[in-house]
Structures are given as C-alpha cells and as structure tokens.
C-alpha cells in the first residue's frame, strides 16, 4: 500500500479530500436547515441530489446545455421543487408530534425517486463529459481537477449565500428564530409553514448545486443518493446541527478522512471508518465538533 | 375588549373579562391554570369548550401567529427570547406581523426610548444579557408588534427586587400609554397594587375577583397568599 | 372477548394457509413463492413492530440482523458445527437468531443509552452499513463479496420452506402477542408514552429497550436463516440490502404500527400488490412501495387497522 510516501502524495490526498468534501458540506447545510425548522432528518436529500444531477445530465445530452450553465435552470427548479414537496408531502406531517411520520414519508420519497430514476435512466452509471471535465491544473506539483475546483467554488458561494440570507433578510432571521424555538416564533407572528417551506426549498436548492457539481465530477447512479446522504449526515454530525459553516467544514473533514483512509486502507474499510466516526460523534459529541457557533442556521 | 373563556383540561369553566385600558391581574398558586389561560388566548393551546372573544372577534380557532396580528402579544414565562440572535434581530422579529411592519422604525424608537439599555446592546446576542435585561427585551419585542393587549406571564420571575420594582413601574407606564395589560404574577403584592381588576385562581377556577386594591386589603387573600411576610413581623432568628 | 375472537381467527387463518400446499404445488407455483415471501416479511415486520411500534424506537438496522442470521446459518452449515445433519436444523436456526441478539445487545447498549428517535435510527443505519463492510471484507470466512454457497442438491420441494415460514410467522406473531400482554409489554408501552415518568416508576429503561431491540433482532435473524437456506447463495448484496429493513417497516406501518395483526395485514397487502405490479414491470414495485408509504403516512398514519378503527368509531 505504501509504495512511496511523499509530501506531494499527502498534499494530493488532502486536496482531493477537501475538494470532494465540499459537496458533502452543502448537502449537509440543506439537511441542517430542514432539521432546524422541521426537526426531521430528510433522508431523501442524497436522492434529490442525484435526481438533479440526472436533470443536469438530461439538459446536457438532450439540449447540449453546459452543466455549469444549467445551474441557471436547475437552481430555481430545485427551489420550486423544494417548495412543492413541502406543500404536498410534509406540510401536515411537520405539524404533528410524531416526527417518525415525516421520516417515513422521506423514506418513501427516497424509495420512489430512486426507482423512478432507475426506470427512466436505467441503473447504469451516467456521467457528463465536456471539454473541461478532464482538465487538470498542476500548481506546485499537485493535480487539481478543474471540476472539483469549481465544486469548491460553488460550495463556498452557496454557503456564503445561505449565511447572508439567514443574517440579512427578515425571513432568514425568522428561519433562525424558528429553528431555535418554534413556539416563541409563532408568538411573534412567524408562521411555521412559511419558514418550513423556505428552509425546505433552500435545502433542495443546495441539493441542486451539489447535483450539478457531482454530475461534472463523478459518474452517478440512482442508488448513490443513499450513500451520499449518509455521508452528508456524517458531515452534519461533525459540524453540529444548526451551524452552517460548521456543516461545510464537517463535509471537508469527512472528505479528508475518506481520501486518506481509502488510500491507506482499501475502499470498503474507509466507509466503515466513516460510519464508525459517525456513530462516535453521535454518541459522544452530538452537538458537533465546533461547539462555538460561527453562524446558526 | 373582552376576553371570555371556557374550559380546558387545566381550567374549568373559567370566565374572565378584560376591559380596554385596564391592568388585569391573574394571581394564584402554581398550577392554578393561569399560564394555561394565557396560552389559550394566544392560540398555543386549544380550548375544549368556550370562546375567546377580542373586541367582538372570536379567537378560538386562530393560530398563534394570527392572534399576534390581531393585536395580542404574549410574553411567556421564562421570556423565551431567541438567544442566538442579537437584541436588534429579536426586536426586528417582534415587528414581523404585517400590521406592525410599516411602523417598524417608530416602534423601534419607542422601544429604545423605554429601554435605553437595549439600544446600547443592540448587537449583542440576546442570550448574553442579564435576567433583567432579557425581561426588558422580551417586553420590548412584544411591544414591537404594536399590541392592544399585552399579556405578561410571570415577568418578575428570577429578578432582583430593585428590577422588579422598575418592571412594575414600566407596566404602569405602558398602561398609561394605552396598552391593556393582562398580568399573571406570583408576586401578588405588587400585582394587586397596580391592577385595576384582579382574579384569584385556584386549581383552575376563579376563587375571587374584584378590584386590585380591594383584594389586596382582603383578609383571606392576605393570609392565603401574601402570607407571613406582611402579617407577622420578621424576627432576627427566623430563616428567610 | 374481542381478543379471544381474534386469536381464534388467527389460528383458523394459519390452518388455512397450512393446508394450501395440499391443493397447490407450492414448488412450482408463483403463489407458493409469494406466500413464502409473505411469511418471511411478516416475521421481520413483527420484530420491527415490537421495537418501533411498542417502544417508539425506530430501528433502521434490521437488515443487519437479517444478514447476520443468514451468514450464521451458512457458516454453521458449511463448517458442520452443529452436526445434526438435518437440513432444516432448528438448532442452527435458533443459533442464527441468537447471534443477532448478541449484536443487538452489544450495539444496543451504547446506542440506546445515548441516542433518541431520529438519532437512534441513524445510528442503526450506520451499524447496518458497517456490518455490510465487515462481511464483504471477511475474506474466506464470509466469502467476501461473492458470499457463501450452500449445497443446492438438498432442495427437493418448497413445502418445508413454506411450512417453516408459516410456522415462524405464526410464532413471531404469537411471541409479540404474548410479550405485549405481559409485564414486559406494559413496561414498554409506558416507555413509549413517557420515558421520564416510566423511569421514575422504577422501570429500568435501558434493559427494556435492549430487550425489545434484541427480540427484533432475533426474529430478523430467524428469518434471515430461513431465507438463507432458501437462497443457497448468501452474499452481501442479497441479504444485507436495505430493502430488508425498509419493506418490513413499510408493511408494518401500512398495516398498523403497534398492533398485533398490523404487520400481518400489511405484509399480505403489500406482497399482493407487488405480485400484481410485477406482472407489468419488476422495477415498479419499489416505486409503488414508495408512493404507498407516502400516501399512507399522509392519510392514514395509523395504517389499515387504524383506518378500520376510525371507521368503526364514526358509526
């Protein structure tokens, strides 16, 4: 396994890890927003990401639209989709005491989407190849894939966007308030359905960004979504629920962990380690690794 | 305006009346149903039977955020501020209901006028304020919604006597500024002093009602609730 | 007296199912296979029902227990450990149920003592995934990703599978029935209603939660064992897939969580539905499952049994 051990190699692994991890990060931010307001773990987030990746793929193969350009279509589409899903699926369930019902609806949605995608696009992995998908830069001897760099950029932009939204807009403040204490929020006049829908829409919007990033980097198949959401959950656990930049950092840490582990150990074990870390964090540090909150979602 | 009431698990066949411009106090031991009553009016809890009428309008089926927009603000027990948000953000959210938003600037001025301290600390996280400051913020936030009726649940809880006195002075000031007040208090003495009208609740029912000063002077009330402090002189050896 | 009638009905139904192989050639008929699946899912669903319906802890790790049961059976058989020589060895099956119990206890102690609700569900999910990796990496002992093979020459007919499946399904239902009516069941329901109050009455929360979790694991393991023997080829993809957790959950929920007959009805209904959709397109059935669970959760969260109750109380 350790054929050669050099700083360059480590730097490469770290870079890859960071770049890939940002996608886990934005998925995690979406989960955090949804959990903050609705108190459910939206287990279908990964599947949504894959679905939007497929849409990106479709736009590319049917209309020749460049993936990054397709963001113009996909982001509004995912925001609308999020709003739509909330209204049709989760609205009544969110008001119930028993959060398991919402969880099960999310499970049902995941199942539904996964298999719908299999019917439409078959189970074979798809990927997008453009002129730049194999473009690689080589600053200081490390390979930096262009698409991964763009993914990082998109992730950072999205995170900043979300933070600004939460900080500067009234509805964003309302989302933060509702995430902290929904009952008190209603007492100042904030309608729970309004904030839930907004949080959910943004969550899916972020899934859209992640989906496009993913589509340009890796081949994907309908069932990858579940694995992805587990990773997003791990990132969320690491970063601490309610902490937007923490979620991004959590994703990056996970990316690093995976990158290193899958190099020094074989692929399967790196997954097991990720899950083990997940369990440990859930049990011993459920508020996340970054206890001091940088920004609350 | 009237607030009439009916029954709910913790409250049995209760009826109270709050007239416009008055301070009405609800006193009684813990668990007597006072908070439940306020919760029902604000819409957090639903009454099994009975009606809540506000200036002729029925509030019974409304949700809390709708009740706020009609002019009733509720400051719950324990304040329940948004501790991770700043003072200013809390105040901004206070003016969230549509009826209050256009008047935000004016309301903010008024709030700063009443509580200059809040202006100083406007960018501080609400959770980092002291107990008294938090209570002030909670009331200020409720005022941002420009309520006609302000409901306060145990505002003096956990505060030092000096601040409590300032609190009650503030309540009177607000009342003079045309805010009707429905007050739930453990501190019976202070509450009855400022109340125009008061109800004494016991295990979900009204035990007594009348004008504030009358009830204060009432022997039974004194013995049952105000207790040792005012009826017996303190001796050096008594623990307190 | 409603109880007595229900019990008699259940016994009659079981007997009815038992006679089926005399009229139908279960080995070749599709119906026989379907019924077998129905029994299998009932077993796992009852296990999940007990954990989730009666204690309120949603476990998403049943597939780990199921797979563990299947692998245990395969390993015991291949290394001829129990040396009983029977193919349908009750000892092997029992042990295959027991191994998951051990896992349940090992995993349950940290998970159940620290995690609640959603977090617990996630934790069990994580455990399931870890188990999958362990089995894939197990080398020759677990056959890695190819899995283990049992001699298929022993398969003569479907009948023993059918009857064993029926028996286990009946056993699972009866077990849950008796447990819920016992002191244990009472304690569990108290825990579901209000944990703090239950604890203050002296109910040792962790002990009971682990017990429920272990029962769920035991039943899943038994079923895994049975299915493993049926399948002959036990590999991670077939016995450790999430479907083995999700479908029983769906069936339980559709039928009615927290009831005795709920899982049975749900399992029956869903398998019937799958049978119908399979005629058109095999992929359709998970899609249908997904739609179904959404609809059920939205409109009748208490499942079919809840619906019946609601209709009855409206009259």
Image (spheres, coloured by chain):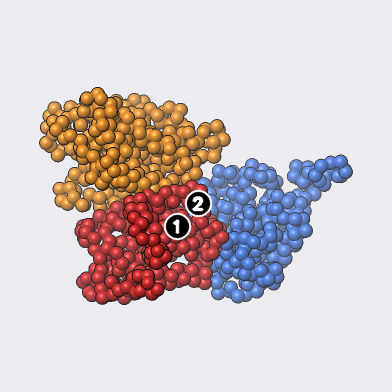
Chain colours: A red, B blue, C orange
Near mark 2 (Cα within 10 A), the count class, few <14, some 14-19 or many ≥20, is many
Q: Earlier in the sequence, mark 1 or mark 2?
A: 1
User: Which element carries disc 1, helix, strand or loop?
Assistant: helix
Determine the image quadrant of residue A139. bottom left
Closer to the camera in the image, B155 or C314: B155
Residue B164 in the image, given as x and y percentages of width and height: 74, 57
Which residue is the site of mark 1? A236
Find residue C21 and report its horizontal and vertical position in percent.
15, 29
Q: CA distance from mark 1 to mark 2?
A: 10 Å
Instruction: Say which quadrant the N terminus of chain B sits in.
Output: bottom right
Decide: is A272 above or below C109. Answer: below
What residue does disc 2 label? A286
The C terminus of chain B: image quadrant: top right
**Residue drawn 25% across and 65% down?**
A127
Left or right, A237 with reference to A105? right
Instruction: Give the SS element for disc 2.
Output: loop
């Amino acid at each position: 396994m350790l054929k050669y051990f050099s700083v360059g190699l480590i730097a490469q692994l770290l870079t890859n890890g960071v770049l890939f991890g940002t996608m886990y990060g934005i998925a995690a931010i979406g989960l955090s927003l949804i959990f903050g307001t609705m108190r459910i773990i939206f287990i279908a987030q990964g599947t949504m990401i894959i679905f939007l990746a497929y849409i990106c793929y479709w736009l590319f193969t049917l209309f020749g639209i460049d993936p990054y350009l397709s963001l113009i279509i996909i982001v509004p589409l995912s925001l609308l989709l999020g709003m739509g899903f909330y209204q049709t699926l989760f609205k009544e369930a969110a008001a119930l005491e028993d959060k398991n019902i919402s969880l099960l609806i999310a499970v049902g949605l995941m199942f539904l989407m996964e298999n719908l995608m299999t019917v439409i696009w078959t189970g074979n992995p798809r990927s997008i190849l453009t002129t730049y998908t194999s473009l690689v830069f080589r600053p200081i001897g490390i390979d930096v894939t262009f698409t991964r760099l763009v993914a990082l950029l998109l992730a950072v932009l999205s995170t900043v966007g979300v933070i600004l939204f939460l900080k500067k807009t009234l509805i964003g403040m309302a989302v933060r308030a509702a995430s902290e204490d929904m009952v008190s929020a209603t007492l100042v006049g904030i309608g729970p359905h309004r904030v839930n829908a907004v949080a959910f829409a943004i969550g899916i919007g972020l899934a859209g960004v992640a989906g496009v990033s993913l589509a340009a980097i890796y081949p994907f198949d309908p069932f990858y979504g579940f694995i992805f959401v587990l990773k997003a959950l791990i990132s969320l656990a690491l970063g601490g629920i309610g902490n937007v930049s923490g979620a991004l950092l959590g994703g990056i840490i996970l990316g690093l962990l995976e990158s290193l582990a899958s190099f020094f150990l074989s692929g399967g074990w790196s997954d097991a380690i990720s899950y083990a870390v997940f369990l440990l964090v859930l049990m011993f540090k459920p508020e996340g690794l970054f206890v001091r909150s940088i920004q609350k979602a | 305006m009237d607030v009439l009431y009916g029954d709910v698990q913790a409250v049995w066949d209760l009826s109270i009346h709050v007239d416009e411009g008055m301070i009405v106090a609800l006193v009684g031991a813990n668990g007597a149903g006072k908070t439940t009553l306020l919760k029902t009016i604000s819409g957090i809890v639903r009454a099994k039977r009975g009606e809540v009428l506000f200036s002729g309008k029925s509030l019974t089926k409304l949700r809390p955020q709708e009740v706020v927009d009609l002019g009733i603000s509720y400051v719950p027990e324990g304040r329940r501020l948004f501790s991770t948000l700043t003072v200013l953000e809390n105040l901004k959210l206070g003016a969230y209901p549509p009826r209050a938003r256009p008047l935000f600037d004016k309301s903010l001025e008024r709030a700063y006028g009443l509580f200059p301290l809040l202006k100083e600390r406007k960018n501080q996280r609400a959770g980092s304020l002291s107990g008294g400051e938090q209570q002030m913020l909670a009331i200020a936030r409720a005022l941002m919604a420009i309520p006609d009726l302000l409901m306060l649940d145990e505002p003096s809880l956990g505060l030092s006597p000096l601040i409590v006195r300032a609190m009650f002075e503030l309540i009177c000031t607000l009342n003079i500024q045309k805010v009707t007040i429905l007050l739930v208090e453990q501190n019976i003495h202070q509450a009855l002093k400022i109340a125009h009208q008061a109800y004494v609740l016991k295990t979900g029912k009204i035990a007594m009602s009348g004008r504030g000063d009358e009830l204060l002077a009432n022997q039974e009330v004194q013995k049952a609730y105000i207790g040792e402090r005012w009826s017996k002189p303190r001796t050096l050896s008594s623990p307190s | 007296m409603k109880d007595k009638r229900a019990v008699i009905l259940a016994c009659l139904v079981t007997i009815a199912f038992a006679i089926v192989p005399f009229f139908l050639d279960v080995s070749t008929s599709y119906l026989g296979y379907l019924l077998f699946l129905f029994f299998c899912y009932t077993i796992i669903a009852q296990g999940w029902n007990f954990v989730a319906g009666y204690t309120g802890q949603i476990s998403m790790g049943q597939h780990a227990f199921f797979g563990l049961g299947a692998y245990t059976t395969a390993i015991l058989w291949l290394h001829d450990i129990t040396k009983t020589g029977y193919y349908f060895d009750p000892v092997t099956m029992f042990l295959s149920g027991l191994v998951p119990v051990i896992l349940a206890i090992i995993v349950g102690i940290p998970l159940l003592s620290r995690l609640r609700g959603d977090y617990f569900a996630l934790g069990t999910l994580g455990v399931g995934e870890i188990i999958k990796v362990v089995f894939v990496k197990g080398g020759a002992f677990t056959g890695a990703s190819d899995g283990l093979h049992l001699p298929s020459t022993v398969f003569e007919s479907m009948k023993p599978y059918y009857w064993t499946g029926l028996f286990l399904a009946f056993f699972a239902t009866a077990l849950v029935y008796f447990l819920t009516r016992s002191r244990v069941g009472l304690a569990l329901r108290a825990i579901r209603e209000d944990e703090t109050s239950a604890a203050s009455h002296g109910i040792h929360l962790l002990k009971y939660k682990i017990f429920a979790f272990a029962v769920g694991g035991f039943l899943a393991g038994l079923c895994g064992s049975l299915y493993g023997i049926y399948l002959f080829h036990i590999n991670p993809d077939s016995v450790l897939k999430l479907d083995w957790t999700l479908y029983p959950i769906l069936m339980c929920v559709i039928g009615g969580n927290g009831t005795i007959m709920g899982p049975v009805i749900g399992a029956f209904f869903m398998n019937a539905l799958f049978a119908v959709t399979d005629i058109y397109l095999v992929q359709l059935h998970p899609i249908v499952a997904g739609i179904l669970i959404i609809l059920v959760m939205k409109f009748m969260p208490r499942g079919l049994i809840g619906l019946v109750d609601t209709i009855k109380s409206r009259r």
